[in-house]
Every structure is written in structure tokens, then in C-alpha cells.
Amino acid sequence: MLMVIGPLEIFGILLLLIIITTILSRSLRIVREWERIVILRLGKFVGTRGPGLIFLVPFVDRGLIIDMRLNTIDVPKQEVITKDNVTIKIDAAVYYRVIDPEKAVLRVRDYNYAIAMLAQTTMRDVIGQIELDDVLVKRDEINRRIQSIIDEITEPWGIKVSMVTLKAVELPEGMIRAMAHQAEAERIRRARIIEAEAERTAAKILSEAALTYENHPIALRLRELQTYVDIAKEKNVIIITESLGAKTATEAIATALAAQKASTSTSQELSK
């Protein structure tokens, strides 16, 4: 005997399939490797599960998925007044991850929003205690200080703040011009100091050379002749006039040569 299925029976079967599919979709949850699921049964915490296939009691259990990977929050630009009363705009990025899903769900309502607000207030407090020059130079130290404060506060939330980085510091245009003028003045000062040091060193060397030439007139004459040779290399016309100093130098050279010749003759006679 064949059973005839009418429209009413077909509708009932479809309705039953929809109910079963809905129950299964609410009962079975797939938790990926980097996720954990916090289970609340009738509003009460019963445990943390995952990763893998998780079964929930339909209409009784509620599962909250928590991402355990490193997350990033972009802190928008904030106007901050430094210790020396300079208004600057500064923004940062906060890197954190959830290490305890239970605390992240039960102890803070929205940890992403809470960390963002905490980062803004902490950044303003820390920068407000530092002068502008230190803000521009000691970026790494400021990053570590902000990270330490935020991490200490978020630890009871089951969240670990790994790093905080200041991305940009915007200065007023007047301050930028003043700093540029200061840097230019500093470079000019250093250039003048280097030039003065060079002049002092050169003067010292020249004074030592003058003493040497004073004690050895022949050396001065040889230096003069070498200068003529250097000038002649450029194919220039040189007019040399004999001066008193030149005569003295010439006589000194002649005397030295005569003494050397006499010494050589005496040596030869003694050897004979």
C-alpha cells in the first residue's frame, strides 16, 4: 500500500529540517587554531574550549570567540602639551594579545575600546611630563614607559601589551622654523670653531718652521729654490732678484761647501 504525501506533510518535513539545522548550527562550533571559545551556560561561566569542534547545549550555552593573535590598535592623533609648554600632535600604535580569555571576557566589557582609551590618556600623561627636546630624541625610552604603564593596568584583564610605538610627532610651524634656525646657528658655530682650530694649528706649525729656518738659513734658501721650481712647472716667467738675505744665504752655502771640501782634503792627507 503506497503512502501519499500531501502538501501538509511536505511542509512539516521542511519545518522539521529547518529546526534541526538551526539546533545543530547553535550546537556545533568550529574553533580555529588561534581562537578560544568562552562558554557561558545560562549566563554562568563554565570553561574555555578550543581549538577544534565544540558542542554547545542548544538555547542553554552561549559561546564567545576570543582571538589569541597579536592585535594592533591605531591611536588617533592627540594634542599634547609638553613640560615646556609646547603644543604638539602625536599618534601611536599599540600591539597586544589576549593571554587569558576568561579574564578578557569577565573583567572588561570591550577590551579593544578600553585599551584604546587607556593608551590615549597614558600617552598624554607621559608626554606632558617630558620636555620637547626629550620627546624628539628619547622616543624609545618613551615607548617603553608608556608600554609599561598600559601593561601593568591591563594585566588583570588577561591582556599582554607587547609594544607601543610613537608613529609621528607634529610640531607647530613656528617651532619648526625656530628649530631650523637653531640648527643652522649650531652648524655655523661648529664651522667657526673648526676654522679657528685650523688657524691655531697652522700658526703653531708656521712658528716652529720659522724657528727652524732661523737656526738653519740654508734650509730657508733651499725652500725658496724649491718654490721657484714649483712655479716653473706651470711655464711661468720668473724674475729672481738677489737680496741681502739671499746674499747671506749664498755666503752660508759657499762657506759650508768650502768647509766640507777642506775637511775632505784633510782626511785624504791624513790617510796618505
Image (tube, rainbow, N blue to C red):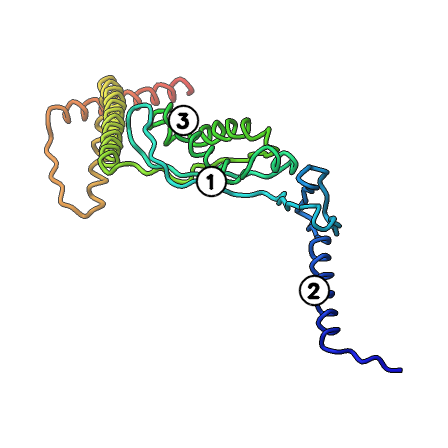
In the rendered structure, the answer to whether residue 11 lies left or right of residue 194 reads right
Residue 93: assigned label: 1
Q: How far apart are marks 3 and 2 (CA)?
A: 56 Å
Asked whether residue 169 appears in the rendered view, the answer is: yes
| Nearer to the camera, 5 or 174 | 5
Contact check, label 3 and label 2, Cβ < 8 Å: no
In the rendered structure, the answer to whether residue 200 lies left or right of residue 8 reads left
Give how far across and how far down residue 114 sits, in percent.
Answer: 50, 36
Mark 3 vs 2, N-terminal side = 2
In the rendered structure, the answer to whether residue 101 lies left or right of residue 111 reads right
Q: Residues within 10 Å of mark 1 (few under 14, many from 20)?
A: some
| Foreground: disc 3 or disc 2 | 2
Query: In what element is the residue under mark 3?
Result: helix
Query: In what element is the residue under mark 1?
Result: strand
The correct choice, above or below, for 54 with respect to 83 in the image is below
Give how far across and how far down residue 212 sits, in percent.
Answer: 26, 20
Residue furthest right in the image = 1
Which residue type carries mark 1?
A: Ala
Q: How crowded is mark 2: few (under 14 residues within 10 Å), some or many (20 or more)?
A: few
Which residue type carries mark 3?
A: Asp
Mark 2 vs 1, N-terminal side = 2
Residue found 36% across the figure and 32% down from its top: 136
* Residue 45 occupies quadrant: top right
Which residue type carries mark 2?
A: Ile
Residue found 74% across the figure and 48% down from its top: 57
Q: How far apart are marks 3 and 1 (CA)?
A: 16 Å
Q: Name the residue under label 3.
A: 125
Q: How far apart are marks 2 and 1 (CA)?
A: 46 Å
Query: In what element is the residue under mark 2?
Result: helix
| Nearer to the camera, 195 or 33 | 33
Contact check, label 2 and label 1, Cβ < 8 Å: no
Q: Mark 2 points at which residue?
A: 18
